[in-house]
Image: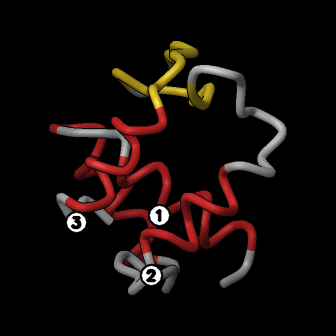
Amino acid sequence: LLHGEAVGLGMLAITSGVVHERILGVLTHYGFPTHYEFDIEEVMSAIQRDKKKSKNGLSVVICPAIGSFEIKEIPLEGIKEHLKEGRI
């Protein structure tokens, strides 16, 4: 999985509604993956080494609308639950 592909999948995972549909359309149009099989424990292990990880969670960029963003800290357990829900 290339970095850009991972970024695209991550954007799908943290967006919803119109933003999600627009990103999905762009990824599909350019042949990027829109789904990826992964091991949750491997992802959680990699997050432990991520530069955005803090003591309490992981800082992520949320895109509530095209052209805007928010930086939020998501608790690690919340990320794990999100992955279990299969949003990617």
Q: Name the residue under label 2.
A: 38
**Location of the C terminus (image quadrant):** bottom left
**Looking at the picture, which amino acid does disc 2 mark?**
Phe
- Label 1 or label 2, whichever comes before in sequence order: 1
Q: Which of 20 and 14 is in front in this view?
A: 14
Q: In which quarter of the image is residue 55?
A: top right
**Looking at the picture, which amino acid does disc 1 mark?**
Leu
Q: Which of 46 and 26 is in front in this view?
A: 46
Name above or below for residue 11 compared with residue 61.
Answer: below
Horizontal side of residue 49 vs 25, given as left or right? right
Distance from Cα at disc 2 to Cα at disc 3: 10 Å
- Label 3 or label 1, whichever comes before in sequence order: 1
Q: Mark 3 points at which residue?
A: 86
Distance from Cα at disc 1 to Cα at disc 2: 12 Å
Q: Name the residue under label 1.
A: 9
Q: Are marks 3 and 1 in contact (CB under 8 Å)?
A: no
Q: Do the residues labelled 1 and 2 touch (CB within 8 Å)?
A: no
- Could you tell me residue 1's position as x and y percent? 66, 84
Horizontal side of residue 70 vs 29, given as left or right? right
**Looking at the picture, which amino acid does disc 3 mark?**
Gly
Distance from Cα at disc 3 to Cα at disc 1: 12 Å
Say few, some or many: other residues with alpha carbon within 10 Å of mark 1 (under 14 / 14 to 19 / 20 or more).
Answer: many
The structure residue drawn at horizontal position 69% and vertical position 67%, both measured from the top left corner, is 4
Picture disc at residue 83: none
State which mark lies toward you, 3 or 1. 3
State which mark lies toward you, 1 or 2. 2
- Could you tell me residue 32's position as x and y percent? 51, 80
